[in-house]
Image: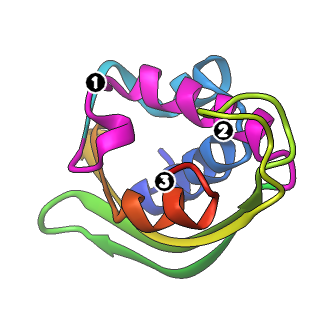
Amino acid sequence: MASITAIAKDFFAACETGKGWEICKIYCAPDASFAAQAEPLADIKTLAEYTDWMKGVMTTLPDGSYQVKSFATDTERNNVAAYAVFSGTHTGPGGPCEPTGKKTNSDYVYVMQFTGDKISHMTKIWHSGLALKELGWV
């Protein structure tokens, strides 16, 4: 069985490059839940919805990329936390307006909770307001 760290790293890479649920689901429980205290994600309650939302983000910000700053496993609590910076420029279709050509560099953290070797819940910690402002969306 792969370690939860390895599974989390593979999931993270697939999610952050916009692969969507079809690819990400192999790392997750079918009913994996999602939570975030960020307005753009307020209505997203499942990890399936979130991974497909990220797929859309990569259409709107086609140069989207991430840089991992920290990746930590808490074996006692059976979770993995990933801290990264997402960068992208609004040059593609989508978003609340026509492409602005503006760029964001946005810090965020994923906390991936495992049940066995599957992600059963993920919380995203993200200050969305700053990212939206940088992109010219507010």
Q: Position of residue 25 (x, y in %)?
A: 52, 23
Q: Please identify, in this view, whether the residue under mark 3 or under mark 2 is nearer the observer.
A: 2
Disc 1 crowd, CA 10 A, few/some/many (<14, 14-19, 20+): few
Q: Which residues are magenta?
A: 36-63
Badge number at residue 8:
3
Of 32 and 95, which appears nearest the observer? Answer: 95
Q: Which residue is mark 2?
A: 57
Horizontal relation, residue 77 to residue 29: left or right: left
Q: Which residue is mark 1?
A: 43
Give the Cα separation between the discs numbered 1 and 3: 24 Å
The amino acid sitting under disc 2 is: Val
Dividing the picture into quadrants, the one containing residue 21 is top right
Mark 3 and mark 2 residues within 8 Å of each other at the beta carbon: no
Q: Please identify, in this view, whether the residue under mark 1 or under mark 3 is nearer the observer.
A: 1
- Check disc 3 and report its element: helix, strand or loop: helix
Of 77 and 112, which appears nearest the observer? Answer: 112
- Check disc 2 and report its element: helix, strand or loop: helix
Horizontal relation, residue 90 to residue 44: left or right: right
Task: Name the residue rendered at 26%, 59% in the picture.
Answer: 79
Mark 1 and mark 3 residues within 8 Å of each other at the beta carbon: no
Give the Cα separation between the discs numbered 1 and 2: 16 Å
